[in-house]
Image (spheres, rainbow, N blue to C red):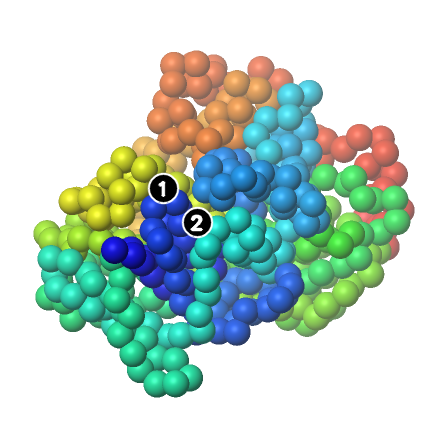
């Protein structure tokens, strides 16, 4: 008897889940309500699609396990993505000072437009599996609180019922899963939102001649200053371009959409380096602004009952402030969990869906804690404020970051956790705790740790007189 799996959503989470399902299902159908572009082009349904996206090392490692016969790293690099070694290929100003650059590369992350990433993953999955994509809008789940049996969908021809042996909701932050579950009789889903009111503003520039190897440059926001957060980033992307993303929280930190004001905002950050870089670069686009940046989580793993053969992954499960760059990696790791459990029990194993949902929540928890523990400090944040535990964690974290500005031991621990190659427990290893308590063995860096060549590039680009 033929076994069919249905995935709702053809974004990154949906296509990776489809790849996982393709190894055990006879057919995998991915539903998406939008027309999908034939190339790496922006599409509807991705509110943050024009802004900076970072694929962390842990997320890439998960992807490598999911698409049969494909090195996703090689595939993305061939498509134009850039690979950034955190230890030596990044300039980062934290609230505690500049991170040094070391001889060791450390974990590597991939940078490119979200359009390229989604397209490249979709191409790889479709070329190496029997997954098919259909244009349709999911209306509701079929089945009962004990078991989901399919999806009722709307297509150009009308409504129909699509039977399935397994269903994945990867429809993104706009998912209607809480309503769908209520229709099955499951109404105890707890949700939480923490919203710092972050606004993103992004513009693309042509990489200036001779600056193709300039490192990714990041000026982080300071959640602890008592004022609104302001940050800026320049990251190299495909097509010999720089993506410049500015971000700020409510209460006066919001970046503008006007091009001249955009540059002034970048120059007025705690260090003007991002503004100095782009002051002499050729802009290729207008400034794109987005407000869809809140942290929102659905605690589906905590419901009293959960239907067999149905799971939720990606942004439909949890969204994060994009400043921290972990959403895509969490989605990939959720699909990896699905793949692992399918390999153990097959498509219809008893308790499979509950196990996957609970295991996926563990990846969510680490990213959620990292994002929310900082966002609650911004004035005007809705949905949370720092408690006693937050204050204790923050005190340790700030001391560790301060140490990491001059200690490779502490810096490597920070990179491992932010890259999602290990969990937050990495920060509590004896060697990390000892380094944190001892403090940085090297003095604070005075200014950005630039090489001689990079200083010359910056001087050549700087038209502000800084």
The Cα atoms of the two marked residues, 2 and 1, are separated by 8 Å
Q: Which of 364 and 272 lies nearest the eye of the viewer?
A: 364
Q: Could you tell me if residue 229 is visible in this image?
A: no
Q: Could you tell me if residue 90 is visible in this image?
A: yes
The residue pinned by badge 1 equals: 339
Mark 2 burial class by Cα count in 10 Å: few <14, some 14-19, many 20+: many
Name the spot of residue 382 as percent of width and height, x first. Answer: 34, 61
In the visual, does 323 lie left or right of 270? left
User: In the figure, 245 relative to 100: above or below?
Assistant: below
Residue at 64% from the left image edge and 51% from the top image edge = 112
Residue 361 is drawn in which quadrant? Answer: top left
Q: Which of 172 and 223 lies nearest the eye of the viewer?
A: 172
Mark 1 burial class by Cα count in 10 Å: few <14, some 14-19, many 20+: many
User: In the figure, 326 relative to 27: above or below?
Assistant: above
Residue 265 is drawn in which quadrant? Answer: bottom right
Q: Tell me the SS state at disc 2.
A: helix
Name the spot of residue 255 as percent of width and height, x first. Answer: 59, 63
Residue at 27% from the left image edge and 47% from the top image edge = 347
Name the spot of residue 433 as percent of width and height, x first. Answer: 40, 18
Q: Quadrant of the N terminus?
A: bottom left
Q: How many marks?
A: 2
If you read the primary sequence from the N terminus, does the residue marked by circle 2 or circle 1 appear first?
Answer: 2
The answer to the question of whether label 2 and label 1 lie on touching residues, with beta carbons closer than 8 A, is yes
Residue at 85% from the left image edge and 42% from the top image edge = 457
User: In the figure, 256 relative to 78: above or below?
Assistant: below
Q: Tell me the SS state at disc 1.
A: helix
The residue pinned by badge 2 equals: 19
In the visual, does 138 lie left or right of 422? left
Residue 219 is drawn in which quadrant? Answer: top right
In the visual, does 1 lie left or right of 305? right
């Amino acid at each position: 008897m033929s076994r069919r799996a249905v995935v709702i959503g053809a974004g990154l989470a949906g296509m990776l889940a489809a790849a996982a399902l393709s190894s055990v299902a006879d057919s995998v159908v991915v539903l998406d309500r939008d027309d999908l572009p034939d190339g790496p082009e922006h599409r509807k349904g991705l509110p943050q699609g024009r802004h900076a996206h970072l694929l962390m090392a842990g997320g890439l490692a998960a992807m490598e396990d999911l698409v049969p016969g494909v090195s996703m790293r090689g595939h993305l690099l061939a498509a134009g993505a850039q690979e950034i070694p955190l230890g030596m290929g990044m300039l980062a100003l934290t609230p505690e000072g500049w991170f040094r650059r070391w001889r060791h590369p450390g974990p590597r992350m991939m940078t490119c437009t979200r359009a390229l990433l989604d397209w490249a993953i979709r191409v790889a999955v479709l070329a190496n599996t029997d997954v098919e994509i259909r244009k349709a809008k999911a209306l509701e789940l079929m089945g009962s609180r004990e078991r989901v049996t399919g999806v009722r969908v709307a297509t150009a021809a009308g409504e129909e019922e699509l039977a399935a042996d397994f269903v994945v909701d990867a429809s993104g932050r706009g998912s209607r899963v809480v309503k769908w579950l209520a229709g099955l009789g499951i109404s105890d889903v707890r949700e939480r939102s923490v919203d710092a009111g972050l606004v993103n503003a992004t513009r693309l520039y042509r990489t200036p001649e001779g600056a193709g190897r300039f490192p990714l440059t990041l000026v982080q926001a300071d959640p602890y200053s008592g004022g609104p957060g302001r940050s800026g980033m320049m990251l190299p992307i495909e097509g010999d371009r720089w993506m410049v993303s500015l971000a700020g929280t409510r209460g006066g930190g919001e970046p503008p959409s006007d091009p001249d004001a955009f540059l002034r905002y970048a120059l007025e950050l705690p260090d003007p380096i991002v503004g100095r870089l782009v002051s002499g670069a050729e802009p290729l686009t207008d400034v794109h602004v987005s407000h869809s940046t809140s942290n929102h989580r659905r605690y589906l793993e905590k419901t009293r009952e959960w239907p067999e053969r149905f799971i939720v992954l990606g942004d439909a499960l949890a969204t994060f402030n994009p400043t921290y760059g972990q959403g895509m990696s969490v989605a990939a790791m959720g699909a990896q969990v699905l793949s692992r459990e399918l390999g153990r029990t097959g498509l219809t194993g008893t308790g499979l869906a509950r196990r996957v949902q609970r295991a996926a929540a563990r990846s969510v928890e680490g990213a959620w804690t990292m994002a929310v523990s900082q966002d609650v400090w911004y004035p005007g944040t809705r949905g949370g404020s720092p408690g006693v535990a937050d204050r204790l964690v923050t005190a340790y974290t700030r001391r560790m970051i301060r140490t990491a500005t001059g200690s490779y031991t502490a810096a490597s621990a920070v990179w491992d956790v932010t890259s999602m190659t290990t969990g937050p427990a990495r920060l509590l290893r004896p060697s990390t705790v000892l380094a944190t308590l001892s403090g940085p063995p090297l003095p604070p860096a005075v200014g950005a740790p630039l090489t001689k060549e990079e200083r010359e590039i910056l001087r050549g680009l700087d038209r502000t007189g800084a």
